[in-house]
Image: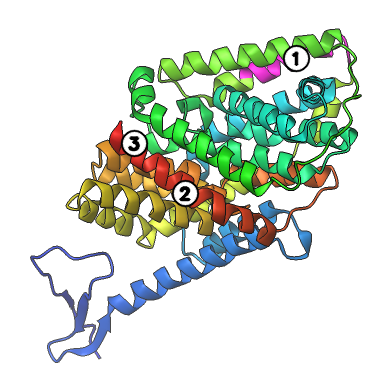
Amino acid sequence: MSVSKLRVQNVLKPRPPCANLTVRHGSKGIGVIHLTGFLAGRAAAIWLISLVSIALVLIRPKGWPEAWWAAAGASLLVLARLLSPVSAARAIAKGLDVYLFLTGMMIMSELARREGVFDWVAGHAVRASRGSRSRLFVLIYAVGIVVTVFLSNDATAVVLTPAVLAAVRTAGAEPLPYLLICAFIANAASFVLPISNPANLVVYRGDMPPLGRWLLTFGLPSAASILLTFLILRWLSNKVLRGKMQTHVDNRPLSLTGKLTLYGIALLAATLMTASALNMDLGAPALAVGLLLAIVISFRDHATPKDIAREISWSVLPLVAGLFVIVQALNSAGALDAAVQALHAMKQWPPLLAALSSGFGIALISNLMNNLPSGLISGAAVQAAHAAGPLRSAVLIGVDLGPNLSVTGSLATILWLIAIRREGQEISFWRFLKWGVLVMPPALAMAILALLLG
């Protein structure tokens, strides 16, 4: 039998990637192939592998680290030829600034933990509470706001949390409400400044507004988010915060290396603020300050590099890299197109409905797949759809604040969970969800309303 020519029927109207493209074999139409089935099957396989991988990251079967499941899912996508090695490598490379930023923050946080800086801060808060659990709640919340705003939500999760836990254990108070402060404020205050959350840079993707315009846009929504989150957490913790506690915690002054670390934290905050104002990437400056401080302290304590290398949770980096690869695969399977179409449709809706829908929609997706992949997809979709104004701002608020619903909603909360596990504390997914379902929706709604009023 002679080889027949293949004729692809072209249609003038544009079609989506999975449109029904018919390939006819020969003039008799023998061997009709529907490419729709092939493309739909490939997309379905990508969605299945990706969602199962993300679910395993959230569930952590047998207690295995989150990074294993993300890396396994990314590897399977490549091995199954659902994503080319080149595309996977490019996806991993896109996260370079995030890896640098996280590494710098982890170095700084380990130095602060090692030198007792935040133990010192938490100890001062316990003493300033004068034995009142309620007053301590307010003080730790205030410290959490400052750390989140100027050092990012990851610093609150990784650095402040262990210090708070140690201080409240010494004071004889129930740790849960104070630990939840660290988790919830890390997201609730994460859009006060561009540097408060790496997700802000992902959503705006090189189109970051000037600092003044940022504050005018997100100042009021941030205040609403912080205040309402505080009021609901305080109400839920009311019974636990009754009674007195000890205030005789360790009040030794900081050592010389501890003071150097404190100055390094101040330098880091100033550096990140400057980089943000100049619209620069934050990863390299954060890593540079972290390494500089580690080198300086190493002159006095030669064990510093070894201790830092051993104690840092390096698994966070392959976790993030795996999520970047999974997002790349999901975009090729139609996730980006669906997000762009949704934003185009919302442009035609009334502003209040559009802002609430986009904010709560991305918040829900963030809790289903973590806000890092959802932020990557929504950031690309916002640019592709040319979304602007309250619609774009509501997307960012949903990415930042929405993860307060569940313990695995954001990278910061995962880091928080890792930090408390290292200290022998465990909070289950369902226990966190019981708090999150009461805290997040009202705070998100109020923040979006404040956005429209601003």
- The image shows residue 100 at horizontal and vertical percentages of 59, 29
- The image shows residue 143 at horizontal and vertical percentages of 66, 25
Any magenta on residue 385? no
In front: mark 2 or mark 1? 2
**Residue 74, quarter of the rendered image:** bottom right
> Which residue is more in the foreground, 419 or 405?
405
Kindly indicate whether the residue at mark 1 contacts the one at mark 3 (C-beta within 8 angstroms): no
Residue 400 shows in this picture: yes
Which kind of residue does numbered mark 2 sit on? Pro
Q: Which residues are magenta?
A: 288-302
Q: Secondary structure at mark 1?
A: helix
The C terminus appears in which quarter of the rendering? top left
Residue 85 shows in this picture: no
**Disc 3 versus disc 1: distance between alpha carbons?**
37 Å
When the figure is inspected, residue 122 is found, relative to residue 40, above or below; the finding is above
Any magenta on residue 290? yes
Q: Which mark is residue 451?
A: 3
Please tell me which of labels 3 and 1 falls first in the chain: 1
The N terminus appears in which quarter of the rendering? bottom left
> Which residue is more in the foreground, 319 or 149?
149
**Mark 3: few/some/many CA within 10 Å (<14, 14-19, 20+):** many
Which kind of residue does numbered mark 3 sit on? Leu
**Disc 3 versus disc 2: distance between alpha carbons?**
14 Å
Determine which residue is flagged by label 1: 261
Q: Which mark is residue 442?
A: 2
- 159 vs 8, left or right, is right
